[in-house]
Every structure is written in C-alpha cells, then in structure tokens.
Amino acid sequence: MKIKYTFLIFLYYLLGCSNQKVSEEKLKELEFQLKEKNKQVTQLKNQIRQQQNSQETEIWYAFEPTTEYNIIRLGSGESKVIDTIELVDSVDVNYNFEHETTISQLKDNRTASILANFIEFEETLHRSNGYGPEISQTSYNVKTLILCEEEGLPIETENCTNNVYILVEPTELGYENNLFIVSRLFRAVVKSQTDSNDGIILTIEHSRFPRKELKILIRPELVKFIE
C-alpha cells in the first residue's frame, strides 16, 4: 500500500512538472507572437509615414510641366534668395542709394505666425477658377507687412531702410504657407496689391525724389520681380 501511495505521489509530481513545462512553452510562444505583432505594427506605422511623406511631396511639387516656379521646401531656420534686382533709391537731392534688392524665401515659423495674425496689413485673395492637384489651380491669400529693421543710411533723418514681408497662404488643405522677405528699400509703402489672371501683383512705392514703383508677382509656386 505504501508503495502504491509513493507511486501516486511520484505520478502527480511528474504531471505537475509536465504542466509547468507546457505552461512555460506556451508563455514563450505567446511572447514570440507578441514580438512579431509589435514588429508588424512598427512596419505598418513606417509604411503609413512614408506614404504620408510621399503624398506631401506630390502635393508640394504638383506643378504643370510648363509652370515656372522658384519655390522649394525649406527646413526650419533656412532661407534662399530666389530673385534679385539692382535699384537706385534717391534719398535726398544729393544722395542716391544704389543697392541690390532681393526676394528671399525663408522658414521662420514665429514670423509667419505673427504675420498670419497681424491685423493692419495688406491682404488679397486670389480665387482659383478650377480644381485639381495643380497648385496653379489653388486659391490663396497674400498678406504683406513692412518693417523698418534694416541698417540705416548715412543721412540725418528718416534713414531707416525697410523689409517687406510677404506671407502666401493657400486655402486648400495639404499646402504649406510660405514666407518671403523683400529687402532692402528706402521709404517703402504698399501702393496696391491686386489680383490678376497671372496671380497677385504687389506694387511697392520706394525712393524719395522721385517716388518709384517696384512690382512683384506672387503665386504659391513663384514670387519674382516684374521688370
């Protein structure tokens, strides 16, 4: 009888060990499956991110083959000169300010945010006549603000030179706002900012004796001087 009980105890022990081994193997299998699922989730996230980036690039560069453009995608804090012109500003009867004026595209989120929320500025809407992925068919707002922030000229009064900030805001989803700066002009003011079939035309008055006009064509893909 004692041997029988001993055998039963030994049998229970073997069964317990067997069950524990099965549980450990099952746990390892579940852990492996979980790792594989996590890998799949990570791969799917990467695929979604790549697809989103691809779509953004497609939207950004969705120009017609014949479209003239000079806008590029910039990183934070970057800037690029996209057009230049040689000007002569008459400061007084005896002094002319000969200089190069440039249009630069820049990525400055803080300045763009200020300009987007500024109240007293020139704002013009260009409304699209069509629909589609081409940016030439996109409606957009243009906001303009002039700041006196450049190096002064060697005269006694009114010697500040101006920078003209231009913010282009496409109204369609998927397009980034673009910020531009026109520098540097003497006694600059916005004379007009009007819509046209070609885009928005910004006319800036500058110089002093006599006053002169500088025209700039503004589209989401192209900002340039009109000579």
Image (spheres, grey):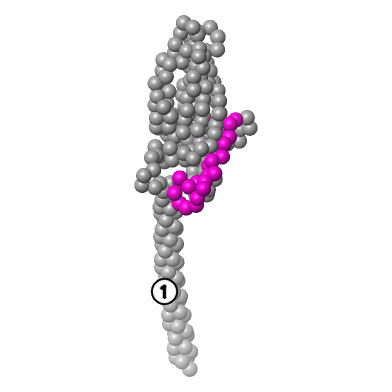
Q: Residue furthest right?
A: 119
Q: Is residue 16 visible?
A: yes
Graded by Cα atoms within 10 Å as few (under 14), some (14 to 19) or many (20 or more), the crowding at tag 1 reads few
Q: Position of residue 210 (x, y in %)?
A: 50, 14
- Taking depth in this image into account, of 130 and 188 the one nearest to the observer is 130
Q: Residue furthest front?
A: 197
User: In the rendered image, which quarter is residue 47 located in?
Assistant: bottom left
Which residue position is annotated with label 1?
25
Q: Which residues are magenta?
A: 121-144
Can you say whether 21 is above or below 213 in the image? below
Q: Residue furthest bottom?
A: 1
- At 51% from the left and 17% from the top, the residue drawn is 211
Q: Is residue 56 visible?
A: no
Can you say whether 15 is above or below 81 in the image? below
Residue 122 lies in the magenta-colored region: yes
- Taking depth in this image into account, of 153 and 98 the one nearest to the observer is 98
